[in-house]
Amino acid sequence: MSARSTFQMTSGCGCTLMVLAGGILLANQASGAVVIFVLSVISVFVFAGWLTALFQMTSGNPQHAIRSWMGWGLTVSELARRLDLSEQQLINHFPKYIDRPIPKRSGGTRILRIPDATTADIQKRILQRLLPLLTSHRCATGFEAGLSIVDNALPHVGQAVVIKLDLVDFFPNTHRDRLELYFRRIGWGKEAASILVRLTCDEEGLPQGACTSPRLSNLVNFLMDEQLDRLAKSRKGVYTRYADDITFSFPKDYPQRVRGIILKTRWIVRRFGYQLNSKKQLILRQHQRQSVTGLNVNTKACLPRELRRRLRAARHRMKTTGSATWTEEQLQGWASLESMVESQTASESER
């Protein structure tokens, strides 16, 4: 379902409130003036919710969406100028992809859709020239400049319960119609938005393998992240999302509340076109090893104990014998990650 649902949800809730309030007041034989006053207050609430949603969806520039809907959106000519390409290049180019299977760490294969050279160049221009100033939700920590797996893990340190959920086929299920609505909302006219969708999407949605897909997946899901963040806050919890990995954590562990969070999350993501992977659902209590994006978060964010032990052993073998099961590049990579985790954890504890 398209992101248009946000407005439908806001207005739908408002209409429900109006009907309930009107029914109650009429049932109690309230005066017409009181009924009108109450319904007016609710109307203001609905309008404020609608305006807030519009502000969030347009990266703080709702006038761009209004201009686009009125037929004054940015043109193909402006798109060509910003990308330093000709209009004909944009109009006439149709991307081609090569499917390349790669193994998953958990088993099975993942299909990467590799764009042709011309498409890759255009997508790189879109990524570098159109997307940097747009706003994604603060809880979306994957693929964002200056953020890492540590930023995704730190908010969940020391919690009573951690809930880990996974979105099925995240990129392909970020559908074309949602991307077109997003481009219209940030100010592009109908023709320019259609071209942008053609250049960044395949026949289903975002191709996993295009350089624009990670950033666009965060931008288009601002409202989904906002709703899931509010869900967590309503239970005094924390929410983050790293690509298709959703994490909630809470200071108190109420089993019934945990089940409710999962059910409501399933309902929210479905409204945005996604499904939860029931096979990858994890509920981690304090007596268990709580892991978020590969880092332990029971008491502090750190690499898993077994990995740290293997890393120390590999360093020792490299120092004493000059060889190890890991290459020098692998050791340096793990050492850099360990250093980054320790540095960010220390900075967080000093705040």
Image: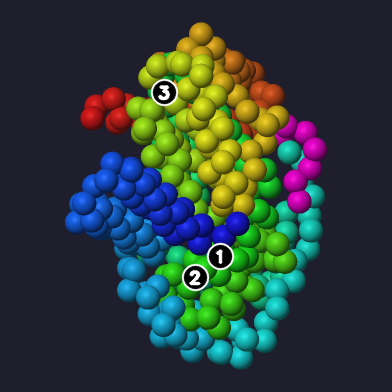
* Identity, as a three-letter code, of the amino acid under mark 3: Phe
Circle 1 packing at 10 Å, graded few (<14), some (14-19), many (20+), is many
| Residue at the spot 61% in from the left edge and 91% down from the top edge | 88
Q: Is residue 232 left or right of residue 45?
A: right
| Residue at the spot 48% in from the left edge and 49% down from the top edge | 224
* Identity, as a three-letter code, of the amino acid under mark 1: Leu
On the image, the x and y values in percent for residue 135 come to 38, 58
Q: Secondary structure at mark 2?
A: helix
Q: How many marks?
A: 3
Per the rendered image, the range of residues in magenta is 105-111
Label 2 belongs to which residue? Answer: 183
| Residue at the spot 43% in from the left edge and 79% down from the top edge | 68
Circle 2 packing at 10 Å, graded few (<14), some (14-19), many (20+), is many
* Identity, as a three-letter code, of the amino acid under mark 2: Phe
On the image, the x and y values in percent for residue 119 come to 65, 73
Label 3 belongs to which residue? Answer: 250
